[in-house]
Image (cartoon, rainbow, N blue to C red):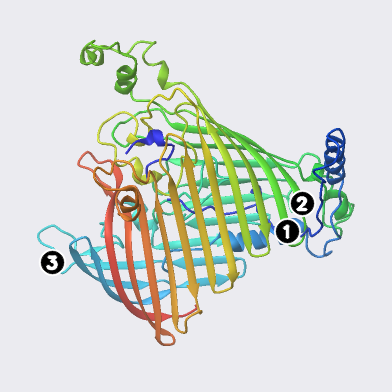
Amino acid sequence: MNRNRAFPKGSRVFRKPTRGNFLPPLGFRNSYYIDATAPRAVLPLLIIGILFFFLALPGPAQDAEQPTTTTENNISTRLGETNFLTSGLYGGGLTFIDDDAYVRLQLQPDIPLGKVGIGLDLILLYNPYAEGIESQILAEDGETWGNPSTWLRLIRYVSYGQPYEPVHFRFGELDYLTIGHGSIMSGYANYDRRGLRLNLRKSDNRYGVETMVNDIGNPSIFGGRAFLRPFQRGGNNPRKAGGLPSSENNNLLTRFELGATYLTDINPNLQEDGEKPLTAVGVDVGFPIFERSTFRLDLYNDFTFLNPLSDTSESLLATAPIGENVDSQLETAPTEENTATTTNLAWGNAVGIGFSFTQTIFKIEYRIFGDGYIPSVFDYTYESAKSQSPKSGMPQFLGLETNEEPRRGFFSQFIWHPLPQFHFLGTLEDYSNSAPKLYLGVTESGLVPRVAARAFYTKRDIGTDTGETNFFRDLVDLDEKSAFSVEIRYEIYPPVETIITREYRFRRVETAEGRSQFEPIHKTSIMVGLKTDF
């Protein structure tokens, strides 16, 4: 695989819309029309006049009991957060991992306590064919119980509040995590480890932060984003003492938003100890042009820096004169000149427009990158990507070739929730000198009596390293560049149900050197049990 293609090796899709993202709802039904036959000198004046009008355009009065931002984020969060992980079953069955068969016992209660939610995840696999010192009782993916991260999986989640509320806390799996607009982290997954997400914001959304840690048992990726609406005045909840009416805080100027993001992986290379961290820093500005009760239109721009630590050997290969012995250079101690490439910053910029209307969210970004930049580097398959590197030096997907021309292209996302029983999510990235990256997710519950289903599929670098395989064959092949899950539930007699799952996922393993990494597995489970609320 060629990581020069703009996509990190190794999920997401899925981005979670939160405050600071473009997506909350709004409602605007007026339209404006400019006659194309008007004199050219008049058109600029009309455009300037319309933009000035929008700058001071107030929104309709809001419900006194609920701020605009809370209503918007409620809808966008409901649209953007779909859990594709199996949960809530009490029962057992069989699990097949690659060529091995296990007896499965599963207890997954959900315990709601007001704003606090607790979910447990007791899944045991019994290996009847264990021999010698092999363990008979294993964890969910066939792992032994020798790692703190494995024990932490017994707690599926502990949460407080919702992502759009002033305080939101969640300890548990990160299945599709997006920070900000997603230029750095979009659809990240920690493969059922137990990470942490903490969001804090002022009740009127004037400022706030969103933070994350990938794995409490073995933390390596962490950071977050802070945002500020510098021109917003007072509070936009008219019931607050001294708060200004919501209309005074509902125009383009007061909705103008600034953001700053910092995310780092302190262990980006599993093949080497003591390497420099992979760090990304970004700034963004957002302009919610229209912001109403059922409709919202946003413009935003993200500018990001990344330190892609290039492999020394690749740098020498790229700069060595033709015919010169490169092996002799590799044996020489690195000099200041040939190690300079390890400290260069790569840059990327994304200009986006986001549209939200009732049960639909759509956004599209035009992205342009300098040499060595990786868009949305922390994505769904990031963790597995850095486990695939066959040698020391930076992970394979970060060993980017030198490009004379900046890469550019489009990122698009579509979320559709037409019925309470149906939810669809799709994202597509495609850039010049790169291969596309795709994420699809869908859930259905109740459209067919007694049947529920959910599925997701993601793949990066589609069509690369395929040999004789064509683009469409590579699109559906399951390999280290992809992840896949499908689950079908059938209620035999409520609350008794049967579940069949088929997954291509990644599990944590330890190498002979004691390093922790992820490897792909094929997993099929057949279960029967009770589906009840605690």
**Residue for badge 1:** 295
Q: Quadrant of residue 173?
A: bottom left
Mark with earlier residue (1, 3):
3
Q: Residue at x 33, y 62 (%)?
A: 503
- Indicate the secondary structure of the residue bearing disc 2: strand
Q: Quadrant of residue 114?
A: bottom right
Mark with earlier residue (2, 1):
2
Vertically, is 407 above or below 135? above
Residue 243 falls left or right of residue 180 = right
Vertically, is 315 above or below 513? above
Quarter holding the N terminus is top left
Q: Residues within 10 Å of mark 1 (few under 14, many from 20)?
A: many
Where does residue 499 sit, x and y in percent of width and height?
36, 76
Residue 285 or residue 323, whichever sits in front:
323
Give the amino acid at mark 2: Phe
**Residue for badge 2:** 290
Q: Residue at x 41, y 71 (%)?
A: 108
**Residue for badge 3:** 129
Q: Nearer the viewer, mark 2 or mark 3?
A: 2
Mark 1 near mark 3, Cβ–Cβ under 8 Å?
Answer: no
Vertically, is 438 above or below 140? above
Give the distance between the C-alpha atoms of the residues marked 2 and 3, in whole angstroms: 63 Å
- Indicate the secondary structure of the residue bearing disc 3: loop
Mark with earlier residue (2, 3):
3
Q: Nearer the viewer, mark 1 or mark 3?
A: 1
Determine the residue located farthest toward the front in the rendered image: 37
Residue 418 falls left or right of residue 141 = right
Tell me, yes or no, if residue 27 can be seen here: yes
Give the distance between the C-alpha atoms of the residues marked 1 and 3, in whole angstroms: 59 Å
Give the amino acid at mark 1: Phe
Where does residue 510 sit, x and y in percent of width and height?
25, 46
- Indicate the secondary structure of the residue bearing disc 1: strand
